[in-house]
């Protein structure tokens, strides 16, 4: 969007600039005046028509491909090496600066943080400049989220979020101003267990709330390979076409062969962090990339359960089990992909039975 706006503004500037030049041209030579006007008209038409840039880009790309034919493979991969080194050089100071800025914001927003439990309410008070109070009704809590990131692992602390509604996906939630969720930063795992007993007082047995627990099993390996072999070739083809446009077939092949292993490593890292577990009264879902995010959903708070099956899943007798609570929507449903169809149907029937027979209010 910004590129389109810049292109339009640039064209308007060129047109205005050239029209001013034409107005300033004072000549009595009719032939020269007509030539200037023809040139001006041609340039204006060229600048107004944005599609005219594509032939120019194609011509420039063809020239670049001719130049790259004479370069060695090492020379073609040199920009990639420079990008990686530059990213590392820029990333480390950026992370340090971002950590300092975030620490300052955290200090201002969480100064004199207090968490209290009064009857059926969970109350937090925090803030240095502006004192903020957030109150959540315990019977309305839908999901307990546990975050274990690099910072948390370094200090052996976890971040906990008690969520009543879905405001964490809004702008206010991103800014930390959501009114239907309570954030509890930097606590020990033992405190998380105690908090779970407070948030879900009617439950007698709790699952392991450690995001690294071995009781949480990963999503099916089929999910990993389908994502790798199903979407991977399309991404590789698009990358190869883009690099070919700039540096030719040999350069595109070299860049793709250098970047594909990194993409596979990223996808594998994400997949190995995913997982799920079913307990008597809870469903646990885990995801993450460098860290972990564990979502604890009481079965009594679920409102909808359904099964979907794609064409690819039919060949392996797999399906996706989707769970919905009051705090979730179709955009961020609690999804367990590529599980056995018979097992998913048994779990669906069990969850629906528990939902219908439960006397706990949804919200």
Image: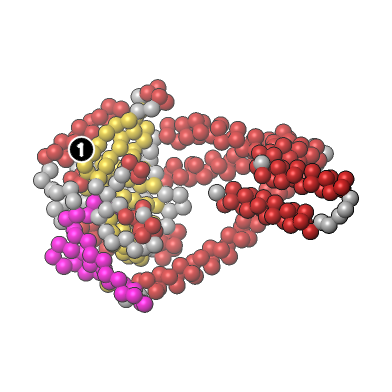
Span colored in magenta: 115-144
Residue 98: give x, y in percent of width and height.
Answer: 51, 65
**Most foreground residue, 160 or 177:** 177
Residue 78 located left or right of residue 303: right
Colour convention: secondary structure
Residue in the picture at 31% in, 58% down: 161
Q: Is residue 50 above or below residue 164?
A: above
Residue 331 located left or right of residue 352: right
Residue in the picture at 62% in, 42% down: 259
Residue 254: give x, y in percent of width and height.
Answer: 69, 38
Q: How many labels does the image show?
A: 1
Query: Is residue 152 visible to the viewer in this orientation of the structure?
Result: yes
Residue 336 located left or right of residue 325: right
Going by the picture, which residue comes out furthest to the top? 315
**Most foreground residue, 52 or 269:** 52
Residue in the picture at 19% in, 54% down: 140
Query: Is residue 208 visible to the viewer in this orientation of the structure?
Result: no
Q: Is residue 181 above or below residue 37?
A: below
Main SS class of the magenta portion in the image: strand
Q: Is residue 318 above or below residue 60?
A: above
Residue 362: give x, y in percent of width and height.
Answer: 18, 48
Residue 187: give x, y in percent of width and height.
Answer: 32, 65
Q: Is mark 1 on a helix, strand or loop?
A: helix
Task: For label 1, count other residues whose C-alpha is less than 10 Å away and answer few (under 14), some (14-19) or many (20+).
Answer: many
Q: Does the magenta stretch include residue 123?
A: yes
Residue under pointer 1: 351
Q: Does the magenta stretch include residue 360?
A: no
Residue in the picture at 35% in, 65% down: 186
């Amino acid at each position: 969007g910004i590129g389109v706006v810049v292109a339009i503004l640039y064209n308007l500037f060129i047109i205005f600039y050239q029209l001013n030049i034409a107005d300033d041209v004072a000549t009595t030579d009719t032939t020269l005046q007509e030539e200037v006007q023809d040139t001006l008209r041609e340039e204006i038409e060229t600048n107004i028509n944005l599609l005219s840039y594509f032939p120019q880009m194609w011509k420039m790309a063809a020239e670049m491909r001719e130049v790259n034919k004479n370069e060695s493979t090492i020379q073609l991969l040199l920009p990639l090496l420079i990008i990686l080194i530059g990213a590392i050089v820029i990333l480390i100071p950026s992370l340090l600066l971002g950590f300092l800025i975030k620490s300052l914001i955290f200090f201002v927003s969480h100064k004199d943080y207090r968490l209290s439990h009064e009857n059926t309410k969970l109350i937090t008070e925090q803030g240095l400049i502006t004192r903020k109070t957030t109150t959540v009704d315990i019977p309305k809590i839908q999901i307990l989220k546990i975050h274990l990131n690099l910072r948390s692992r370094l200090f052996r602390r976890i971040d906990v979020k008690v969520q009543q509604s879905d405001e964490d996906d809004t702008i206010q939630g991103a800014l930390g101003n959501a009114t239907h969720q309570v954030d509890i930063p930097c606590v020990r795992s033992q405190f998380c267990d105690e908090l779970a007993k407070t948030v879900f007082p009617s439950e007698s047995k709790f699952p392991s709330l450690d995001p690294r627990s071995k009781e949480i099993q990963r999503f099916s390996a089929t999910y990993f390979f389908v994502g790798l072999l199903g979407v991977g070739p399309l991404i590789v083809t698009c990358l190869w076409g883009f690099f070919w446009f700039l540096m030719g077939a040999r350069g595109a092949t070299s860049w793709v062969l250098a970047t594909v292993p990194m993409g596979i490593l990223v996808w594998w890292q994400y997949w190995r962090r995913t997982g799920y577990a079913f307990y008597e009264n809870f469903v646990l879902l885990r995801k993450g990339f460098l860290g972990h995010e564990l979502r604890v959903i009481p079965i009594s708070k679920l409102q909808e359960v359904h099964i979907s099956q794609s064409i690819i899943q039919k060949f392996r007798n797999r399906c996706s089990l989707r769970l919905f609570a009051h705090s979730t929507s179709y955009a961020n449903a609690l999804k367990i992909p590529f599980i056995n169809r018979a097992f998913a149907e048994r779990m669906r029937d069990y969850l629906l039975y528990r939902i219908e027979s439960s006397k706990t209010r949804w919200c």
